[in-house]
Image (cartoon, grey):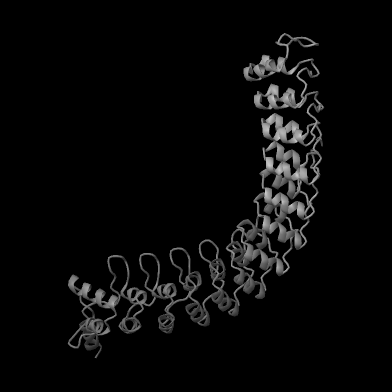
Amino acid sequence: MQEAAATTTDELSPLPASPSLLRQVFAAVQQGRAQAVEKLLAPADGAPLVDANAVDNAGDALLVIAARNGHEQVLLLLLEHGADVDAKNSRGATALMVTATHGYAELARALLKHGASTEIPDSQGKTPLIIAASEGQADVARALAEHGAATEAKDDQGWTALFWAALQGFDEVVRVLLAHRANVNQRDRIEETPVMQAAYNNHRSTVGVLLAGGADIDAQDKKGWSALFHAMGEDAREAVDMLLASGAETNARDAEGTTVLMQAAARNRHEIITALIECGANVDGRMQSGWTSLFQAAFQGHDESVLALLSGGADVNARDTLEETPLMEAAYSNHAAAVSILLDAGATVDATDKIGWSSLSYAASEGFPHVVSLLVSNGATVDVTHKDGLTPLLVASKRDRASVVAVLLQRGGSADVRDRDGWTPMLHAAALGHESVLRILVQHGVDPNLTATEGDRT
C-alpha cells in the first residue's frame, strides 16, 4: 500500500511546464480567468500542467500576481493547489503586502485565513501593517490588526505603522492603530514621535486625533524640537493653531537654547509669531548671546516679522551681551526697511555698543550708503567717536567704502578728523591705495599734503 501511494503522488506532481504553458497561466492569473487557471493547475486527466508556485521573469509568483490584480477566486485556487502563502517577489513583497498596498481587504483576510504571516518584512523592513498604514488602507490595517499584527513593529528607519499614518495624515488608519494599542508616543531613531510627523506635514486633524489618543504635545526630539517647533519650521499654520489651542508650551527651549518664537523670527513666520505671542510666548526671551527674537528678525531683514514682534511688545532697544541693539543688526546687514521700522518704533539711533560703535558705524564699515543716509536723516551723529578713536568716516576711508565716504562728507562728516595716531581719512586712503576715496576727499576740498601730527607711517 505504501508503494502504491508513492506512485500516485509522483503521478500527480507537476511536470516541468513549457514556456507556452507558463505564458498561458501567467496571463490567466493576471486577467482573473479562474477556469483557465484551474485547468492548468488541476486538469481532469492527470497531473498539474504548471506549478502553483511558478515565478515569472520579474520574480513575481502567481499568488503575488493574483493579489496585485485583486483576483480573489484565482488567489484561492492557487492556495488550494499548494501556492506558498508567504512567497516573496524580487522586491521582498509577499501577496499579503501587495493586498496591503492596493487596499484589497477581502483578499488580505483570505490570505490571513490561509496562514499568511503578518510579520514578514519586505526589503525595507516594512511589515504588511506598516505598508497598509503608509498607503492609507484603513480596512486592510484593521484586518491585520484584528489578526494580531504587531503594531510596534519597526521598519529599517525605526518607524512603526503609526509614524507612517501620521506622516501622511491618514486619520482613519491612525484611529485603527490606536484602537489596537499602538504606542502613540513611540520614538524613532532621532527621538521624533508620530505627532511631530503630523505637525510637520500640517495635518491638523491628524494632530488632533493623536492628541486625543494621548500624544505628549510637548515631547522633544534629539535637537529639542517639539511638535510646535516642527510645525513652525514648515510654516504649517493649521497644525500650529491646533497645537496652540491644545495647550502646547510656547516658551520651551531646544538644544541650542532657542524658543519657537526665536526660530519663527529667523524664518519670517510673521503670522505664527503673532499667534505665539497671543498664546503667551515671551517676546523678549533671550538666547545665550543675549539676542531676542527681534534681533533675529532685524538681522535677517524680515520686515513683517519685525513689525509683528514690535506689535507684540518687543523691546526695540534691547541689548545683547555685546551691548548691540536690533538697529545695529539691521544696519550691519543693509536692511534699510527694517532700519526704518525700528527707528519709527523708537530705536535709539546713537546707541553704542561695548566698543563704542553705533548703527551708523556698522553701516559705514560695511559700505551701505543708503542705510548711512537714512540713519543720518534720523539724527545719527556723523562723527561719533569709537573707543579706538575712529569715526565712521575714518573706518569707511580705511575700508575703501567710497560711496559711504561721499555720503558722510555731504552730511557734515569731518574730513579733518584724526585717529589717535593723528591720521586723517586722506592719510589712510593714501597709505592703502584707495584711489576712489582719495578722489572724493580731494573733491571735498581736503588738502592732499596733510601729514599726521604724530609721525608719518607711510
**Is 15 on the left-hand or right-hand side of 324?**
left
**Is 350 on the left-hand or right-hand side of 200?**
right
In the picture, which quadrant includes the C terminus? top right
Farthest residue to the bottom: give it.
1
Q: How many marks?
A: 0
Q: In the image, residue 225 lies at what x, y percent? A: 67, 58
* Residue in the foreground of this view, choosing between 393 and 160: 393
Q: In the image, residue 392 lies at what x, y percent? A: 75, 27
Q: Give above or below for 105 relative to 258.
A: below
* Residue in the foreground of this view, choosing between 18 and 265: 265
Q: In the image, residue 156 lies at what x, y percent? A: 51, 62
* Residue in the foreground of this view, choosing between 258 and 294: 294
* Residue shown at the point (35%, 65%) measured from the top left: 90
Q: Can residue 425 be spotted in the picture?
A: yes
Q: Give above or below for 341 relative to 100.
A: above
* Residue in the foreground of this view, choosing between 65 and 427: 427
Q: Can residue 289 be spotted in the picture?
A: no
